[in-house]
């Protein structure tokens, strides 16, 4: 069995289960025509690109409109932080879509249930 890791709050979690889910979602989205999906982290480090605290795990641009979509990846029992909730609300206020997803199927379905 793999070793557990501690989160910032000191809780223990299974090694990289959210990271594996995020990678699976990214791989699935690569197969969706018209969707450009990128991780907001590289090798476990968040990009310092101005997205700010609480920014989503996966950011997408959807053709042909260029719609911005943010996906916050959580394990089945994972909680959304206050900073993440505020960031997603800001995205939606400015016309983008923001969704919490807990599986590859939820991520794929998110594009069908976002308002146009």
Image (spheres, rainbow, N blue to C red):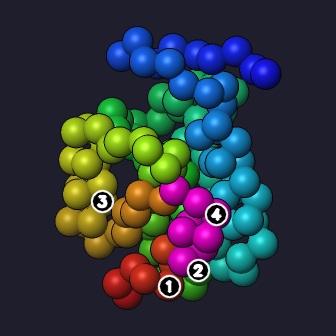
- Pick the front one: 20 or 87: 20
Q: How far apart are labels 1 and 3 at the CA level?
A: 18 Å
Q: How far apart are labels 3 and 2 at the CA level?
A: 18 Å
Look at the image and give the residue range highlighted in magenta: 102-109
Tell me the quarter of the image containing the N terminus.
Answer: top right
- Residue at (35, 42) in percent of width and height: 79
- Residue 91, numbered label: 3
Describe the element under mark 4 as helix, strand or loop: helix
Res 63 visible: yes
Relative to 38, is 80 above or below? above
Crowd around label 1: few <14 · some 14–19 · many ≥20 (10 Å): few
Q: How far apart are labels 3 and 4 at the CA level?
A: 22 Å
Describe the element under mark 3 as helix, strand or loop: helix
Describe the element under mark 2 as helix, strand or loop: loop
Q: Which residue is mark 1?
A: 112
Expressed as whole percent of the image width and height from the top left, the position of residue 60 reads 55, 62
Q: Between tags 4 and 2, which lies in front?
A: 4
- Pick the front one: 7 or 111: 7
Q: How far apart are labels 2 and 1 at the CA level?
A: 14 Å
Relative to 21, is 8 above or below? above
Q: Which residue is mark 4?
A: 104
Expressed as whole percent of the image width and height from the top left, the position of residue 70 reads 45, 59
In the image, 111: left or right of 16? left
Expressed as whole percent of the image width and height from the top left, the position of residue 93 reads 20, 65
Dot 3 and dot 4 residues touching (CB under 8 Å): no
Dot 1 and dot 3 residues touching (CB under 8 Å): no
Describe the element under mark 1 as helix, strand or loop: helix
* Quarter of the view holding residue 36: bottom right
Q: Which residue is mark 2?
A: 63
């Amino acid at each position: 069995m793999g070793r557990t890791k501690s989160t910032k709050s000191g809780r223990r979690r299974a090694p990289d289960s959210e990271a594996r889910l995020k990678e699976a979602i990214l791989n699935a989205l690569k197969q969706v025509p018209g969707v450009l999906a990128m991780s907001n982290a590289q090798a476990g480090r968040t990009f310092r690109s101005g997205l700010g605290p609480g920014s989503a795990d996966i950011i997408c641009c959807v053709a042909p409109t260029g719609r911005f979509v943010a996906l916050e990846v959580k394990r089945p029992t994972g909680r959304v932080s206050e900073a993440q909730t505020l960031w997603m609300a800001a995205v939606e206020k400015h016309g983008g879509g923001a969704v919490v997803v807990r599986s590859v199927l939820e991520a794929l379905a998110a594009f069908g249930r976002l308002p146009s």
